[in-house]
Image: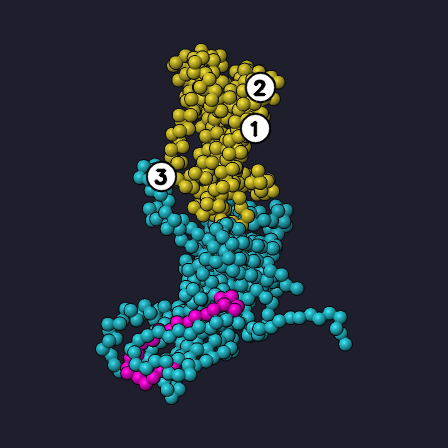
């Protein structure tokens, strides 16, 4: 917990670094901004083609469903991939007086959150285009974002420290995330999964997180409370573990960078 | 009343060696798992060993030593970037470090943008840094480049910008690592002025450098680190003197070993009758060291070699304070050596009753007539430290007694 306070006391630096990270991405022109939207759009176009045209997934307004799950997933994966290498790449920052290494994965997760938020209007346009109404259930969105933030941060912190020690982890991570993507209901919905597999799927915290987005935006209903609470609990516990590990490893991490 | 700004007590810092196999990977960890290789403690090395350092507020201390002597590690321990494995570190006041200047500048951002974020990283608030922005830009003096992305900068420009930001901080303690040689002469002069003004304003400075001139110029005190151990601490000129002598001796030893063969046949050189080959200082336990607490046992062992059959030899020693004052000197009353071609002489001082400071143990070998054959002058530094508040040279045994109510 003290590590979080340390971070909070330097939130001005945190924000400045997040801002720098976001700006690096959109540096140049307005086109730079559109460019970053291109990736999710292309992914969505391909998946829509494959799943709703070729494979004929029986779901109304499938592209909206897909996009709803895809955007938070892109936040998740890009936060983890940049987060994993954040301490290595920020080695010159880590060797500064009073710089908590914890800040670097936090910056990675937060900067990607900003990118996610910047992409949300596109999703809204999409919903309008497909006549998906925005309901009060949209209030569930910030909750989903908060839970995902905690969960992603916890993983990013652990990965960032492990990657300092084991440099090949970053390559492995890409493969693991691809597997994880297919095991999370983004391309398909939870009800499509045979009942016997469903509990297995729910063991994956990203399932409930992504499902919450789909509930809030696509289905227009409030996410199930027990599932949300469970996801929140798991995320908090994981963050507590991450901070525990951080308290133990931070000094070694600084030396190994 | 002066108070310490930095206080290190018995600081030891170990690093794990990566055993030359490069980066660890999951693959290698996985393989090691099956090999049942236990973690060997021998894979550690001590970058700092039992280092004591007290820097009073407003003083500046220079730390010298060869590469790999632990200077930078010491700075990082003071800056609380590294945590020592043993010992305590106390720092009073706001601290700023000039280490790897500009290393974290973002290549895609302009100089101006980098200044802001750099200043914030160094502990200024956004407001403080924006207020000083013009001043910093003027100080760096890199012209229109300030509006260009940092990737277009030369390394000198990056250093200049980095130093400018650092120079406009308002720290109480400044840690400097080898950055005084920033850019061209004009800029180096500006840097020097800046550091001088830091000193004038009573800031504490710790400077790590290879450059003896910088230590002499900027520092009130100097510390010599040798492979993680404090070899000497005291006035800069004295410490530098000891340092240079040790370096020269080491070089001479290397040269000796290299040219021993070629020297064998030359007899036109004056060959000393007797040669003091080495002097070895130790405590009661016989372990080599050069840092002593006042009142401890000091044992000096000198080894000699006779080059010619000589008359009986007398040995003597002197303890000389770093400023040249002879604290004490003595010679053997009787000739100690009569004919053996080589040997050792041991002299034990039961109680090294000196006040804190840097001293040298000089030794000499004389003939019966008092003619010195060989001597070691200012080659063997020894540091004495005392916990009590004392002045002068020698520590005279004394006792206090208070008799109350006995006034006349």
Identified at 31% across, 39% down, the residue is B35
Please tell me if label 3 and label 2 are on a single chain: no
Identified at 41% across, 14% down, the residue is A53
Q: Are the two marked residues, 3 and 2, in contact with CB atoms closer than 8 angstroms?
A: no
Please tell me if label 2 and label 1 are on a single chain: yes
Q: Is B181 on the left or on the right of B304, as rendered? A: right
Q: Which chain is cyan?
A: B
Instruction: Name the residue nearer the viewer: B202 or A116.
Output: B202
Question: Which residues, given as a range, are shown in magenta?
Answer: B292-314
Per the image, is A28 magenta? no
Assign a secondary structure to mark 1: helix
Q: Are the two marked residues, 2 and 1, in contact with CB atoms closer than 8 angstroms?
A: no
Corner quadrant of residue A221: top right
Residue ID for mark 2: A225
Q: Is A120 on the left or on the right of B378, as rendered? A: right
Instruction: Name the residue nearer the viewer: B28 or B99.
Output: B28
Identified at 55% across, 66% down, the residue is B386
């Amino acid at each position: 917990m003290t590590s979080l306070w340390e971070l909070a006391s330097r939130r001005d630096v945190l924000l400045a670094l997040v801002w720098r990270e976001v700006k690096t991405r959109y540096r140049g022109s307005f086109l730079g901004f559109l460019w970053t939207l291109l990736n999710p759009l292309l992914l969505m176009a391909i998946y829509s083609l494959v799943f709703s045209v070729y494979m004929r997934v029986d779901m109304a307004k499938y592209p909206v469903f897909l996009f709803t799950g895809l955007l938070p997933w892109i936040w998740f994966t890009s936060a983890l991939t940049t987060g994993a290498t954040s301490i290595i790449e920020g080695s010159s920052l880590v060797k500064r007086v009073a710089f908590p290494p914890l800040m670097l994965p936090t910056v990675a997760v937060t900067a990607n959150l900003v990118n996610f938020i910047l992409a949300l209007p596109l999703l809204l346009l999409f919903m309008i285009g497909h006549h998906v109404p925005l309901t009060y259930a949209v209030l569930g969105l910030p909750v989903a974002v908060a839970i995902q933030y905690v969960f992603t941060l916890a993983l990013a912190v652990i990965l960032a420290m492990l990657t300092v020690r084991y440099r090949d982890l970053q390559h492995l991570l890409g493969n693991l995330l691809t597997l994880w993507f297919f095991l999370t209901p983004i391309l398909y919905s939870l009800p499509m999964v045979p009942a016997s597999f469903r509990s297995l799927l729910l063991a994956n915290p990203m399932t409930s997180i992504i499902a919450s987005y789909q509930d809030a935006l696509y289905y227009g209903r409030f996410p199930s409370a027990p599932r949300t609470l469970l996801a929140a609990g798991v995320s908090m516990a994981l963050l507590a573990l991450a901070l525990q590990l951080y308290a133990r490893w931070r000094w070694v991490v600084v030396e190994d960078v | 009343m002066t108070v310490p700004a930095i206080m290190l007590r018995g600081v030891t810092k170990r690093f794990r060696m990566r055993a030359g196999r490069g980066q660890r990977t999951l693959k290698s960890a996985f393989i090691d798992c099956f090999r049942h290789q236990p973690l060997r403690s021998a894979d550690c090395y001590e970058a700092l060993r039992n280092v004591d350092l007290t820097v009073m507020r407003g003083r500046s201390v220079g730390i010298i030593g060869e590469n790999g002597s632990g200077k930078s590690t010491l700075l990082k321990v003071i800056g609380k970037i590294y945590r020592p494995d043993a010992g305590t570190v106390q720092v009073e006041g706001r601290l700023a470090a000039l280490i790897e200047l500009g290393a974290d500048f973002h290549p895609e951002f302009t100089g101006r943008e980098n200044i802001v974020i750099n200043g914030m990283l160094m502990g200024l608030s956004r407001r403080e840094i924006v207020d000083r922005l013009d001043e910093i830009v003027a100080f760096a003096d890199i012209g229109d480049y300030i509006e260009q992305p940092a990737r277009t900068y030369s390394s000198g420009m990056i250093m200049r910008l980095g130093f400018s930001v650092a120079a406009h901080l308002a720290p109480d303690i400044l840690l400097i690592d080898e950055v005084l040689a920033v850019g061209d002469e004009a800029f180096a002069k500006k840097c020097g002025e800046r550091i001088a003004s830091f000193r004038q304003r009573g800031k504490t400075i710790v400077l790590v450098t290879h450059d003896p001139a910088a230590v002499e110029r900027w520092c009130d005190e100097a510390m010599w680190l040798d492979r993680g151990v404090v070899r000497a601490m005291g006035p800069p000129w004295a410490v530098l003197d000891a340092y240079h002598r040790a370096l020269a001796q080491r070089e001479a030893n290397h040269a000796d070993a290299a040219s021993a063969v070629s020297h064998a046949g030359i007899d036109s050189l004056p060959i000393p009758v007797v040669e003091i080959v080495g002097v070895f200082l130790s405590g009661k336990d016989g372990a080599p060291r050069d840092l002593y607490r006042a009142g401890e046992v000091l044992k000096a062992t000198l080894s000699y070699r006779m080059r010619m059959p000589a008359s009986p030899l007398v040995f003597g020693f002197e303890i000389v304070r770093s400023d040249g004052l002879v604290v004490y000197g003595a010679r053997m009353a009787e000739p100690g050596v009569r004919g053996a071609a080589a040997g050792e002489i041991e002299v034990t001082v039961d109680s090294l009753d000196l006040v804190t400071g840097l001293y040298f143990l000089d030794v000499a070998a004389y003939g019966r007539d008092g003619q010195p054959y060989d001597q070691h002058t200012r080659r063997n530094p020894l540091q004495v430290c005392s916990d009590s508040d004392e002045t002068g040279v020698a520590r005279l045994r004394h006792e206090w007694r208070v008799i109350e109510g006995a006034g006349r």
